[in-house]
Image (spheres, grey):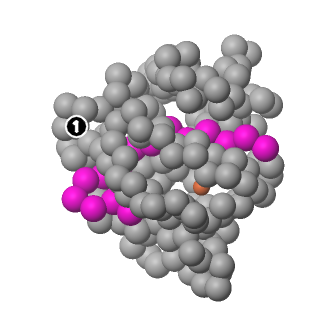
Amino acid sequence: MTRSSFDDALAAAECLHKSHPEVAQFTVWDDAAQFQSLEPHWIPSAKALPLDVGLRDGRELVGYSAFCAPAANARWRSTYKDADIGKEFNQKFGCYQLIGAQGHFFSEILNTYLVYAEKGLFYPWHHHPAEELYVIIAGEAVFEAAGRPARRLGPGDTAFHASNQPHAMTTKDKPVLAYVLWRGDLKTPPVLTPAEQKP
Ligand code: FE
């Protein structure tokens, strides 16, 4: 039961990699990614994601259900647990690694995450050395990045963030579910961008 929901999410990811030109261009797919049993880590998103009807507006991508299915058993991250980001952020934001060294499928060449934000959330300006590609799976959000105008993105749209380019994300009246890929320096976690470096 648990394993099959992760297999379904992996299959949805493979489909996305093979059908979405920007994903295919960003990184190669890893046919050798191996399931590894991880202890689940529960956060509020584990319950909220599959129940969030705001994501189901008829525009969601084919893989939407498959990416939600592992939610209850996923190893959700606590990236900003100790950051000065506000209690509400950690109530409304969730991220689990599907593929990668600490992901549900081990890979040394591929690093992908599911990122979920409830409606009405500001994900403050942050940066990281890894290059990043967001693909919206369902819902919508406003993406901002240094040197670029803000854009409202919906299913199928992408946002690319260069190495250490500060970026921020805001959900308004809808939540968002995104498939996120990293490449480059995978060891350095994101940090909040100091006030003097914000655009
Ligand atoms: Fe980022």
Locate the C terminus by quadrant.
bottom right
Please give the name of the residue rendered at 56% of the width and 29% of the height, measured from the top-left corner: 22
Is 42 on the left or on the right of 141, as rendered? Answer: right
Q: Vertical placement of 181 versus 173: above or below?
A: above
Q: In the image, residue 111 lies at what x, y percent?
A: 68, 37
Q: As shown in the figure, which amino acid type bears the numbered disc 1? A: Arg
Residue 180 in view in this figure: yes
Between 85 and 37, the residue placed more toward the observer is 85
Please give the name of the residue rendered at 34% of the width and 28% of the height, measured from the top-left corner: 61
Q: Residue furthest bottom?
A: 196
Is 107 on the left or on the right of 98, as rendered? Answer: right
Beta carbon at label 1 within 8 Å of ligand 1: no
Q: Vertical placement of 173 versus 53: above or below?
A: below
Q: How many labels, in total?
A: 1
Which residue is disc 1 drawn over?
A: 56
Q: In the image, residue 87 lies at what x, y percent?
A: 44, 76
The answer to which quarter of the image holds residue 120 is bottom left
Judged from the image, the secondary structure of the residue bearing numbered disc 1 is: loop
Locate the N terminus by quadrant.
top left
Which residues are drawn in magenta? Answer: 170-184
Q: In the image, residue 76 lies at what x, y percent?
A: 54, 49
Q: Vertical placement of 25 versus 128: above or below?
A: above
Please give the name of the residue rendered at 57% of the width and 29% of the height, measured from the top-left corner: 23
Query: Ligand 1 appears in which quadrant?
Result: bottom right
Residue 81 drawn in magenta: no
Q: In the image, residue 7 lies at what x, y percent?
A: 52, 19
Residue 80 in view in this figure: no
Count residues near mark 1 (Cα–Cα under 10 Å), then give few for <14, some for 14-19, many for 20+. some
Please give the name of the residue rendered at 22% of the width and 59% of the height, measured from the top-left corner: 173
Majority secondary structure in the magenta region: strand
Is 51 on the left or on the right of 37, as rendered? Answer: left
